[in-house]
Image (spheres, rainbow, N blue to C red):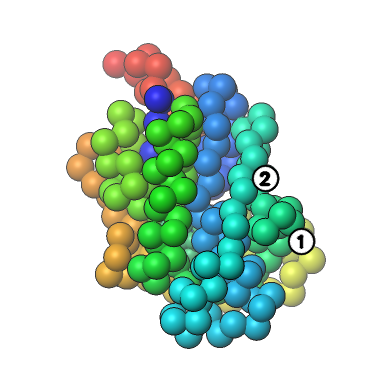
Amino acid sequence: MLNIAVDGHSSSGKGVVCTRLAKKLGVIHFDTGAIYRLIAVYVRDNNIDPRDQKAVEKALAKIKVDLKHNDGEQITILNGVDVSKTIRDNDISDMCSIISPYPKCRDFVLKIQRDSAKKYDLVMEGRDITSHVLPNAPFRFFLTASIDVRTERRYNDLIKKGENVTYEQVKADLIERDRRDTQRELSPLILTEGTIYIDNSNMTIDEEVDLMYRTIKGENK
Ligand code: DC
């Protein structure tokens, strides 16, 4: 199977880049953050306190995940309901970085990730794909951008969605999310040896996708 592993900071543009790259390669775009987000939706909608680790881990038994992949897009289904839009709510993003370090949540997602990588050609995107989930993937990328560029992107997205936020709030949230992602004990976001590091602060999406595509096709030598 052709497995391409991609990690990166929040709002580094991983989602859109991986969607386009997967389309160009004709493989599945597997967004693993969506599964952590789906767990957070279940937790929120069932009034479970996200800081109550035991309660969150217990809830996993009641969660059924179905993912459908179509033309680079992923449809995320929680217990039979399409939650692809709901998982992008701002409160879900916050909740997610609280619940994603829980060991049972990580095991729950890991199984789905590894099963899929065995079955399908894919671009798998997340925080621990290059370091933990698929460390032997033949192509591994780490995507990021400066905190100000990422803040601006996220701020513009949220304003477009009609959310009432300030630039400073968005920046503080991103810094906190980076801290949780990089400093948690279990499979934190790290740059591993042999992983290609791309800072896309001054790149267009097309340039970035093209760079990754040419690297995979061996045209970058
Ligand atoms: O990429 P994203 O923003 O949709 O990820 C949502 C959350 O899930 C974020 O808090 C990081 C976490 N996550 C993770 O811990 N491991 C992954 N492989 C993917 C996402």
Q: Secondary structure at mark 1?
A: loop
Residue 52, horizontal then vertical, whole percent: 48, 85
Q: Quadrant of residue 79?
A: bottom right
- To which residue does mark 2 refer? 75
Tag 2: residue type?
Answer: Ile
Question: In the image, what residue occupies the spot 59% across and 27% down?
Answer: 23
As drawn, 143 above or below 26 = below
Q: Earlier in the sequence, mark 1 or mark 2?
A: 2
Nearer to the camera, 19 or 41? 41
- Residue 92 seen in the figure: no
- To which residue does mark 1 refer? 161
Disc 2 residue lies near ligand 1 with CB under 8 A: no
As drawn, 60 above or below 108 = below
Answer yes or no: do the residues labelled 1 and 2 have beta carbons within 8 Å? no
Nearer to the camera, 148 or 186? 186
Q: Secondary structure at mark 2?
A: strand
Q: Quadrant of residue 181?
A: bottom left
Residue 142, horizontal then vertical, whole percent: 37, 44
Q: CA distance from mark 1 to mark 2?
A: 20 Å
Question: In the image, what residue occupies the spot 79% across and 66% down?
Answer: 162
Tag 1: residue type?
Answer: Lys
Q: Which mark is residue 94?
A: none
Residue extending furthest front?
61
Mark 1 Cα shell of 10 Å, populated few (<14), some (14-19), many (≥20): few
Question: In the image, what residue occupies the spot 46% across and 39% down?
Answer: 116
- Quarter of the picture containing the N terminus is top left
Residue 66, horizontal then vertical, whole percent: 62, 48
